[in-house]
Every structure is written in C-alpha cells, then in structure tokens.
Image (cartoon, rainbow, N blue to C red):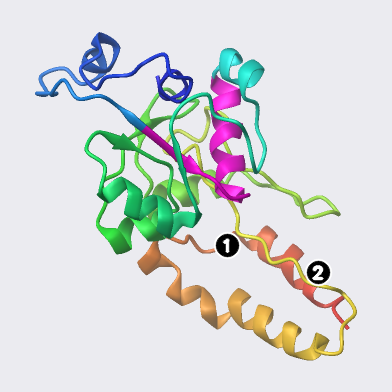
Amino acid sequence: MLAEIYLGQITNWADPRIKALNKGASIPSTPITVLWRSDSSGDTYAFTRYLSDVSSAFAGQVGSSTTVSFPVGVGARGNSGLASALAGTNGGIAYIAVSYLIANRLPAIGIKNAAGRYVVPNLSAIEAAAAVVHSVPADNQVTIVNPPKRAKSAYPISTFTYAIVPTTAPQGGLLQSFISYALGAGQRFGPSLDFAPLPRNVLAADRATVSRIG
C-alpha cells in the first residue's frame, strides 16, 4: 500500500484499498500529497529499502539509495523541512525520523512488518528490530530494515545511527571521548526521543571500532 502511494498509483485517502485496511474509520476524500527528502539521506535509504523489499514494482521503478527519483510528490530538505511541509499540507504523507515526529507532535501510521503486523515506531518496536542482530561484520555495516517474521513486534523501518570519523586525526582523542560518551552514559538520553539502547553485541563492536581512533 505504501509503495503504491509513493509510486503514484494510490492518489486519494478514500481509495478503497486504504478503506479496506481501516474498516469502520471515517476517511475523507482528500488527495494524497507525497513528500520526500530532497537531500541525500539515510532515512531515504531505509525507507526505499523497505519499499523495495516489499514491492517488486517499487524496486524496479525507483530502487533503494540515499537519493532516489520518486515519480510523484514534492521534496523538502532535511527532517525539519519534511516535518514543516507535512504540518502545512492537508492530506500529506512523509517519512520522518521518529525524534522529529515527537518534537512536532505529528501522528505516525502503522507499517506492516514481515510477521504481518502493523507496527508504529516506538521504543519497544525499534528495540525488537535491533534484537535480530546477532553478529556485526568487520565493516560494521548492519541493516535492521524489514527484519524476519520471527521479530513479530519489530518496526520494519528501523535503523542504526552511524558516526563516520577518521581513524587518524589531530583531534582523535577528543573524538574517542565524545563517541565513548555517546556509547556509554549518553545512552540514557535516547529513550525519550525513541532512540533505543544499543544491543550488547553492537556496543561491543562499536567500542572496538572506537579504540582504533588515534
């Protein structure tokens, strides 16, 4: 359904396919305005990766990347730009980082995961997605988009947040201190913004990587 909206195949909120998923709900006949990130974004990658996983049509026509060419809609720069555009657009739909949804008091829709459940982004659902990671490869590239059906309560468009820094830099000690704080005491600030605590095995891999900064 979401893929069809972003492909321009579903253009009104009163479309019978949307009504069928929201039985009993009063849905006005309002045109859908699709909104997307105009800048390169990891959020765009995660969103399009999910849509490509669940829709062969989307995978073939748009694909997944940090920047893609959506066939319909209007672009806005950054999460703040998307949040502002969505707040001012009747009938709009956008993909926005959860912390911005909270800050701007915007509603979230449930996304169907591999177990067939419609899940909204919240702390426990993001943690459930992260819990599927049992090992971290040497290059630290891990995806938790569209986790397997055994993760029944997982939110399917969850991601890790990456910090990309040089391993050799004059300020290497400062970088080590800052990232180590984020991996340690700083973790306690995440839940209020729906940033889930990192799983133990991911934390171990992160700390090993940080130790190589010199």
Q: Amino acid at mark 2?
A: Thr
Residue in view at x 54 percent, y 21 percent:
54
Q: Is residue 147 visible?
A: no
Q: Which residues are magenta?
A: 34-54
Q: Secondary structure at mark 1?
A: loop
The quadrant holding residue 12 is: top left
- Give the image location of residue 145, x and y in percent: 58, 38
Depth check: give the residue in front, 106 or 162.
106
Q: Is residue 142 above or below residue 52?
A: below
Q: Is 43 positioned to the left or the right of 166 in the image?
A: left
User: Residue 163: x percent and y percent?
Assistant: 69, 66
Residue at 33% x, 19% y: name it.
11
Disc 2 or 1, which lies upstream in sequence?
1
Q: CA distance from mark 2 to mark 1?
A: 15 Å
Amino acid carrying mark 1 in the image: Leu
Observer-nearest residue: 74 or 206? 74
Total marks placed: 2
Q: Can you tell which mark lies on residue 209?
A: 2
Q: Which residue is mark 1?
A: 198
Please say whether residue 35 is one of the residues in the magenta stretch.
yes
Up the image or down, 178 lies above or below 153; here it is below
**Whole-percent x and y of residue 109?**
31, 37
What is the crowding at mark 2: few (fewer than 14 residues within 10 Å), some, or many (at least 20)? some
Instruction: Pinpoint residue 39: horizontal percent, then vertical percent.
Output: 58, 50
